[in-house]
Image (cartoon, rainbow, N blue to C red):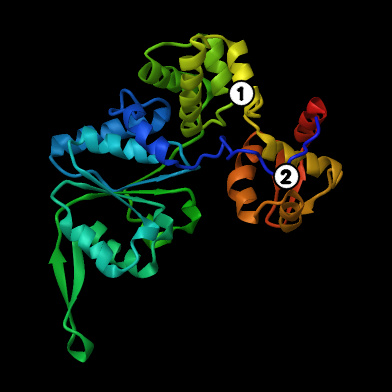
Amino acid sequence: MAIKSSKPDIERIVEPISHEEDIISEVSLRPKTLEEYVGQTQIKKHLRVSIESAKIRKSTLEHILFYGPPWLGKTTISAIIAHEMTATIKHTSGPAIEKQSDIISLLTSLQEGEILFIDEIHRLRPQIEEILYSAMEDFQIDIMIGSGTGATSVKMDIPRFTLIGATTKLSNLTNPLRDRFGHVLKLDFYNTKDLSTIIDRSFRILWYNELNTEALEAIASRSRWTPRIANRYVKILRDYATVWHEINNKKACDTIFESFGVDIHGLDILDRKLLQHLVTTFHGTPVGLSTLASIIGEEIGTIEDVVEPYLLQIGFIERTPRWRKITQNGEMYIQSIQ
């Protein structure tokens, strides 16, 4: 199968990025309790014990750090923790906290027992982190009074709170910040069974109907082990169901996915283009990332952050910091579609 277009005709539907419509619809799709939350079994067991302990002790939870690939439910499970603790949660992100006054304003506005959620916490500036150290450990912050040589530092007590951080790059966190979290928990990719359960639940909410097992598996197998993409597919299929009235079978689902270029593995035209160039242009030999990006016509960051992670997970490519190489499984896949 030849790959003719240099870029997809439409925005990549398999990208696990956040769209405005995703955020709006997910308000109704997101589970509210740990009981409703699907997957991440070990994390749920751990959190149940921690939450119950905090309630018995009438204390706040220890600070929690979630890490792992993007869009696996870090924000969702943080909101669930707040719900289970009957606490208010305030959301922000590392890049949004630009000045020391920003984090001081956030911390001083918290009420006793509230939860502060910081997404992309690995992108906090060093001077912001320094304020968090004492806030997390002693529930105090240092405030400078005055200016110049007459400035003095005064410690100010703040309410006891729980900080929940989320990151896709644990190694980018400094040791002093990481060590102040009482719980460091990794979210893993979802298996097909859990994704099928999520898809079934979401479709019932959006369409008040159900799909058969084969249809659920057809969607789950293309969802790249990510709930965000699975729910995006659910919304698309909901639209087809509205027009066609009947999509409750694998054949109908396969036809729909074929229409926007996503195959049984969840790969789209950009994925296939990268793999095909590794086979036909470079004949399976290692190639530098910048060279590959130039041949494909995409930015290096797009390949690193959007295309490669899933291809690595399914074993179709190998990589080092300097080069990329297609695997035997990747070559067999390209042969099967030609």
From where the camera sits, is residue 152 visible?
Answer: yes
From where the camera sits, is residue 138 visible?
Answer: no
Q: Which element carries disc 1, helix, strand or loop?
A: helix
Asked whether, in this view, residue 72 is left or right of residue 151, the answer is right
Within 10 Å of disc 1 (Cα), the crowding (few <14, some 14-19, many 20+) is many
Q: Is residue 30 above or below residue 176?
A: above
Q: Is residue 323 above or below residue 241?
A: below
Q: Identify residue type, mark 2.
A: Ser
Q: What's the residue at 65%, 55% (across, down)?
A: 300
- Pointer 2: what residue? 6
Q: Sequence-wise, which precedes: disc 1 or disc 2?
A: 2
Q: Is residue 194 above or below residue 171?
A: above
- Pointer 1: what residue? 257
Asked whether, in this view, residue 49 is left or right of residue 192, the answer is left
Q: Quadrant of residue 46?
A: top left
Q: What's the residue at 76%, 29% (across, down)?
A: 333
Percent coordinates x, y for residue 129 in the rendering: 34, 64
Image quarter of the N terminus:
top right
Within 10 Å of disc 2 (Cα), the crowding (few <14, some 14-19, many 20+) is few
Q: Who is closer to the viewer here, 303 or 328? A: 303
Q: Who is closer to the viewer here, 102 or 127? A: 102
Percent coordinates x, y for residue 237 in the rendering: 50, 21
Percent coordinates x, y for residue 27 in the rendering: 32, 32
The residue most toward the front is 243
